[in-house]
Amino acid sequence: MQTSFEKTSLWQRLQTVFGGFDTPLLIAVLLLAAFGLVTMYSAGFDHGTRFVDHGRNMLLGAGILFVVAQVPPQRLMALAVPLYACGVALLVATALFGITKKGATRWLNLGMVIQPSEIMKIAMPLMLAWWFQRREGQLQVPDFFIALALLAVPVGLIVKQPDLGTAILVCSAGLYVIFFAGLSWRLVIPALVIAAVAAVALVLSEPRICQPGVKWPLLRDYQKNRVCTLLDPSTDPLGKGFHIIQGMIAIGSGGIDGKGFMKGTQTHLEFIPERTTDFIFAAFSEEFGLIGCAGLLLVFTFLILRGLVIAAGAPTVFTRLLAGAITLSFFTYAFVNMGMVSGILPVVGVPLPFISYGGTAMVTLGLGLGILMSIAKSRRLIQS
């Protein structure tokens, strides 16, 4: 009898730890991880230990996911303000005492070198979700302006480093929270119209404003060059336009069913720059073609839809806003990366989730997915 009781008790404990995981979301993550390992094996075949390191990074991300999934959303909410304050303080310290590499001051030495802007990818949606949870039932227009101010401070510090890719990810995560909190479409639609008009005006005036010596407000010369190169990469095919041109060649050469695993000529002859990081989607497209890309997009779409389902069923304002923002952050990662590799967006150093090499990005993904799993688990516990 005692042995039976002990076995039942252990089983119940295991159910408590593993039973709350959202199975559909976990399946999507495992599929993307498989895509990532296969692609990295080929793209990083003659690139040192990238494949082994990528697998190690995935295990690290999985461990973080597992640990964070055990943390109740109430405790996550208690971390929102301290984590945000810590992140902003580290960004200020980076601006004052940071390490500069290749003209960018993004790193801080605290005994170990860290990139504080990565913290804000999670701290920003946590903070804004906490803010709107506090204002539940009494939300007014000034509350949205306060949220925008909370968003503007870290984004401004990140842009100043400069790190446009991370600034886009942090800004979009915050804007998703503000939108889901109830921002009126009467404010959203005019902003979208203005952005569309500005984009059309930019395209039409490209020959004039992209001339050497013409300064753009708020943007540095290299950022201006990225936009101008996007509009016409043929103006500098062996320099600034090389990344975009080679990415598009690799994607197009893949055809319908691709050249086959380990048979990508653009990849293995090293025409694709950054083929294991920012431009790994070009390597994937060359070897697996349109069919492989469609499969990858379907899995990403499933992950995003599942995350939105979790957000829709979340029990509190905080968890609903947080789950929605984290889910659409995955969409932003994928859309921006695929867009820049395909030549429809400027090159901005945003990794493709689970596919691109990078330990820091994998840690951030593990944190985000762990929070989604925690929210899904809390919903099941309430329902039961």
Image: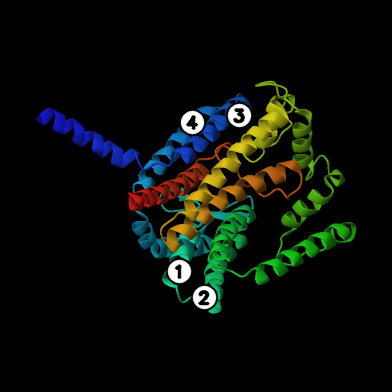
Decide: is 169 above or below 132.
Answer: above
Residue where numbered disc 4 is placed:
55
- Residue 7 lies, with reference to residue 175, above or below; the image says above
| Residue that mark 3 sits on | 39
Q: Residue drawn at (49%, 31%), measured in percent from left and top?
A: 55
Answer yes or no: do the residues labelled 1 and 2 have beta carbons within 8 Å? yes
**Disc 1 marks which residue?**
131
**Mark 2 or 3, nearer chain start:** 3
Q: Secondary structure at mark 3?
A: helix
Q: Earlier in the sequence, mark 1 or mark 2?
A: 1
Q: CA distance from mark 1 to mark 3?
A: 40 Å
Q: Is residue 247 left or right of residue 37?
A: right
Cα–Cα gap, marks 4 and 3: 12 Å
Disc 4, SS? helix
Quote the CA–CA distance across marks 2 and 4: 43 Å
Say which of 239 and 32 sits in front: 32
Residue identifier under label 2: 143
Q: Nearer the viewer, mark 2 or mark 4?
A: 2
